[in-house]
Image (cartoon, rainbow, N blue to C red):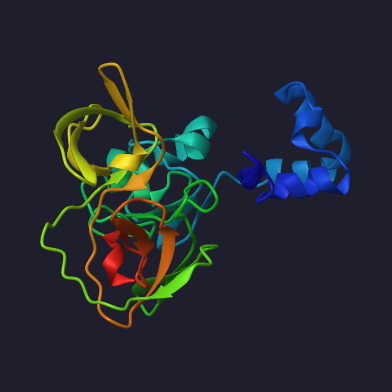
Amino acid sequence: MELYEKSTEFYDMLHLEQKKLGDFSSLKELGDFYREHFSNEMNWLSSRPLAYETDQFILVHAGIENRPDWENTSEESSLSMPSFYEEGHQADITVIVGHWPAVNYTADRISSNNPIIDLEKKIISMDGGNQIKPDGQLNALLYEDGRFDYTFVDEIHKPSVVQQAHKDPTGRMGTVTYPNYEFTVLQEDTYFTFCENKSLEVKQWVKNEYLLHSGSETRSISDVSTSFLSVQEGDIVSIINADCDGYVLIKNSKGKVGWIPKSCL
């Protein structure tokens, strides 16, 4: 909580009034504090439209409801709809959203916080999980001459140069993401355990240090990549976790997150 709290505008507001989160006994008390001391900012936020529509795009925080009259989407849906990319929509133009981290859609894909740009589904999901994912990032969507691109920044300040190339022979990919942490163990290995995710019914190789076993129950202790990456000598990568046996969790220059042998570094 400490890191997340200090990485938000709301923390800055507390700091300006020499307060901290522990000074408040309830969410109501905390809300009253913000309304009392930052009424102009809160009123400005409350007065913003729920969505912007242009000739080419709809921009909304979480999503629009899957209905022909999408303009009647409820405020609750527009601000807090989960997994909009999986729900779809009936608008005639592309919908650009945040809210639901794009990495949450990568349970069976290469783990990445990069935007998902799906022009066939007419959805761009661009939330990079900044500050709420251990390998999250702040994404910027770029649009010029009818083409999309993106760039990102993050706060992973542990760069390292690959000393030995590695070609991943396994093809393993995926991500464990909140709240899908419950597993059935299929096979235990030296560094990883082959599991079936109970909620998603996908099979993933989870790093042993991220698994907590309690009786007959097995769960992940947090979000973590289950992807394995290839690297070339001289590649510059960001180290996310170097404290596990045998393998290092890294993010490469293209934003892909996964495991490589420690011998590579």
At 19% from the left edge and 35% from the top edge, which residue is drawn?
195
118 displayed left or right of 82:
left
Residue 100 position, x and y percent, is 43, 44
Residue at the far left: name it: 169
Residue 113 position, x and y percent, is 39, 56
Q: Of 191 and 50, which appears nearest the observer?
A: 191
At 43% from the left edge and 67% from the top edge, which residue is drawn?
238
Residue 172 position, x and y percent, is 16, 53
Image vertical order of residue 123 relative to residue 154, above or below: above
Residue 178 position, x and y percent, is 39, 36
**Residue 47 makes an appearance in the image:** no
Residue at the far top: name it: 215
Please tell me in which quadrant of the rendered image residue 43 appears: top right
Q: Of 15 and 99, which appears nearest the observer?
A: 15
At 17% from the left edge and 42% from the top edge, which residue is drawn?
189
209 displayed left or right of 100:
left
Quadrant for the N terminus, please: top right
5 displayed left or right of 225:
right
